[in-house]
Image (cartoon, rainbow, N blue to C red):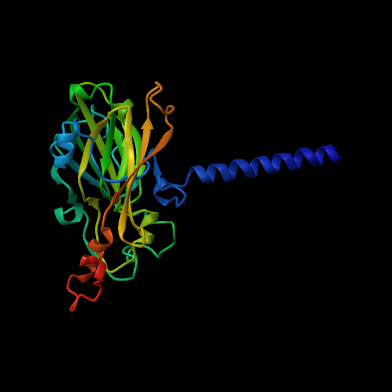
């Protein structure tokens, strides 16, 4: 009898487990608060790779051969909801020549796709459904499908290649050459993907699906126009396998606030299989420091700007 009960209990628990698993698998990505991105590179300071020190010191974003801006003319079509999306539109074999043209960056609603909404504290889709986090409207939640082609220079061969969206609102999938490379849900912060393994010689196809509303929309309830789009630059860039992934610049006053200490912390990444001082995929911190004399006086001069009577002046800075 105990054995029979044990088998029944095991069967019931198994059914519950599979039902819960099935329900979890059915949660759409755009309504899953636990999912903020897939295959996103960790955030880092904004900078580009340059071929030499001289060009880097000029700090011109268009002055490097290792970055290509993907702004400009894209093809676009809108579906009223996720279920109405066009299957396989992201594949090069799908003909989008009859689609509309749009200049990216763009806010889609001001180009006639869907409609702008202005509200203060209410959620922008309350005319469609009662707010129920993390769910968003299903019958009308526009999905904007976009495509364009790009070519990778031959001198990028053997290097890492990254695709960066500086702002997409509010949720998007990205595809390269027919393969989904990931998703992003941070509407006003950059999202970056490593697309090295998806690139091929010659023409490459980039496709994006932008959803107007997602669970992240519940975090955006403020006094503003509620619109969606690819609102900032899109570009690809190339780095060597061993690269500066990130850096941090910090300053402080020392020696009784007289001198300054300037510190740069560099985050190095080795993405090759060779030993370059750090193991593959590991990160090593290098620290460079220097002392700036009389930095305390510079700070006082800054504080004195606009202050009558040099409120912060001190004799030692005369």
313 sits left or right of 30 in the view: left
Q: Nearer the viewer, residue 36 or 3?
A: 36
Query: Can see residue 96?
Result: no
316 sits left or right of 33 in the view: left
Query: Can see residue 163?
Result: yes
11 sits left or right of 187 in the view: right
Residue 72: quadrant of the picture: top left
Q: Residue furthest bottom?
A: 309
Residue 235: quadrant of the picture: top left
Above or below 253: residue 268: above
Quadrant in the picture for the C terminus: bottom left
Residue 4: quadrant of the picture: top right
Residue 54 pos. (x, y %)? 15, 35
Residue 28 pos. (x, y %)? 43, 46
Residue 232 pos. (x, y %)? 21, 49
Count numbered badges in the picture. Answer: 0
Residue 154 pos. (x, y %)? 19, 21
Above or below 315: residue 251: above
Q: Residue furthest right?
A: 1
Q: Nearer the viewer, residue 286 or 185?
A: 286
Q: Going 31% across and 40% down the picture, which residue do you hit?
A: 192
Quadrant in the picture for the N terminus: top right
Q: Going 19% across and 30% down the picture, which residue do you hit?
A: 51
């Amino acid at each position: 009898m105990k054995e029979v009960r044990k088998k029944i209990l095991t069967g019931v628990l198994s059914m519950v487990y599979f039902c819960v698993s099935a329900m979890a698998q059915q949660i759409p990505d755009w309504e899953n608060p636990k999912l903020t991105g897939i295959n996103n590179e960790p955030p880092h300071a904004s900078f580009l790779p340059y071929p030499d020190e001289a060009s880097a010191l000029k700090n011109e974003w268009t002055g490097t051969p290792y970055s290509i801006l993907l702004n400009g003319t894209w093809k676009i079509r809108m579906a009223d909801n996720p279920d109405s999306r066009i299957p396989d539109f992201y594949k090069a074999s799908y003909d989008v020549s009859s689609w509309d043209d749009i200049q990216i960056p763009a806010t889609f609603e001001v180009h006639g796709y869907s409609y702008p909404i202005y509200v203060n504290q209410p959620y922008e889709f309350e005319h469609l459904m009662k707010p129920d986090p993390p769910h968003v409207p299903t019958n009308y939640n526009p999905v904007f499908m976009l495509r364009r082609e790009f070519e990778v220079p031959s001198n990028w061969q053997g290097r890492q290649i990254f695709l960066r969206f500086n702002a997409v609102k509010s949720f998007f999938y990205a595809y390269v050459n027919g393969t989904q490379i990931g998703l992003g849900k941070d509407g006003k912060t950059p999202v970056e993907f490593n697309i090295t393994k998806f690139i091929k010689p010659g023409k490459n196809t980039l496709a994006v699906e932008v959803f107007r509303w997602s669970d992240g929309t519940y975090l955006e309830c403020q006094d503003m126009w509620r619109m969606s789009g690819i609102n900032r630059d899109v570009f690809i860039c190339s780095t060597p396998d061993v690269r500066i992934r990130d850096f941090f610049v910090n300053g402080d006053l020392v020696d009784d606030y007289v001198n300054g200490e300037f510190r740069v912390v560099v985050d190095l990444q080795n993405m090759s299989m060779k030993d370059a001082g750090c193991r593959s995929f590991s990160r090593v911190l290098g620290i460079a420091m220097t002392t700036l004399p009389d930095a305390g006086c510079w700070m006082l001069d800054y504080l004195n700007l606009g202050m009558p009577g040099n409120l912060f002046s001190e004799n030692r800075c005369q």
